[in-house]
Amino acid sequence: MKTLVQEVIEAGGGESIKACYQCGTCTGGCPTAGEMDYTPRQIIRMVNLGMRDRVLTSSSIWLCASCYQCQVRCPRGVRIADVMAALRSIAIRDGITAAKPRAPAFYQSFLENISAYGRQFEPVLILRTIAKSREGVAAKLGFLLGMLPMGVTLLKSRKMPLRAEKVQAIEEVRRLFSNAERLEAEG
Ligand code: SF4
Ligand code: SF4
């Protein structure tokens, strides 16, 4: 049976994860560490120790904003942001969404929007996320109502169009997605 660290490396997290010496530089510069249940430094340690369930059910992997601050500053070349992305992929693949049930739906909807339009279109992003989320009806409604004020503000300030607009090079964007799917299928 594969160890968690092997799974993470295969999912694109990089061999360098084994070189972490727990200096905490990653956590020190992480803008969302204060909201996470385990800091980036702790996540890396737990992956190396094989603490699969605790890592894959943590909120941290979903709260990572992929800003790459940690990754560019790590003195050991650990690809922390890529590790977080690898952990999200593993959690989605294995249907583990306990910590943030809406988050995988959001990630998948985000990519579907990019594939459809080449950019984000927030109303569709929110509706797709609600449709895919495994939450109950009350939670979905609460999320939708919570988003309304921001939507109104964006519309009033003309930061969000009323209709989705595709980028000119949409076919190139779609080719990128097709190539990624082909590479994934080839293993
Ligand atoms: S900055 Fe790099 S070496 Fe330091 S704790 Fe984070 S992952 Fe480990
Ligand atoms: S990539 Fe994620 S873990 Fe790293 S600093 Fe940014 S938010 Fe934090």
Image (tube, rainbow, N blue to C red):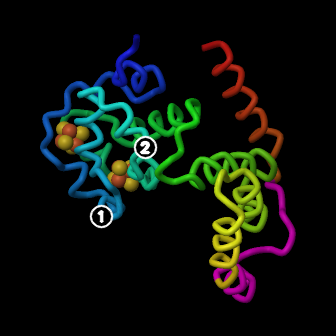
Which residue is found at the position 29% from the left and 41% from the top?
43
Please tell me whether residue 153 belongs to the stretch shown in magenta.
Answer: yes
Image quadrant occupied by the C terminus: top right
Residue 34, numbered circle: 1
Which residue is found at the position 58% from the left and 31% from the top?
93
The answer to whether residue 3 is above or below residue 97 is above
Q: How far apart are marks 2 and 1 (CA)?
A: 17 Å
Give residue 169's position: percent from left, percent from top.
79, 47
Report the amino acid beneath label 1: Gly
21 or 134: nearer the viewer: 134
Helix, strand or loop under label 2: loop
Q: Is residue 151 left or right of residue 101?
A: right
Give residue 72's position: percent from left, percent from top.
30, 45
Which residue is found at the position 64% from the left and 21% from the top?
184
Report the amino acid beneath label 2: Thr
For the record, the magenta segment spans 150-167
Give residue 186's position: percent from left, percent from top.
65, 13
150 or 25: nearer the viewer: 150
Image quadrant occupied by the N terminus: top left
Assign the magenta stretch its main secondary structure. loop
Q: Can residue 68 be seen in this view?
A: no
- Return the residue at label 2: 57
State the image quarter where residue 159 is shown. bottom right
Q: Which of marks 2 and 1 is nearer the N terminus?
A: 1
Please tell me whether residue 27 belongs to the stretch shown in magenta.
Answer: no
Q: Is residue 67 left or right of residue 117?
A: left
Helix, strand or loop under label 1: helix
Q: Does the residue labelled 1 lie within 8 Å of ligand 2?
A: no
Residue 121, numbered circle: none
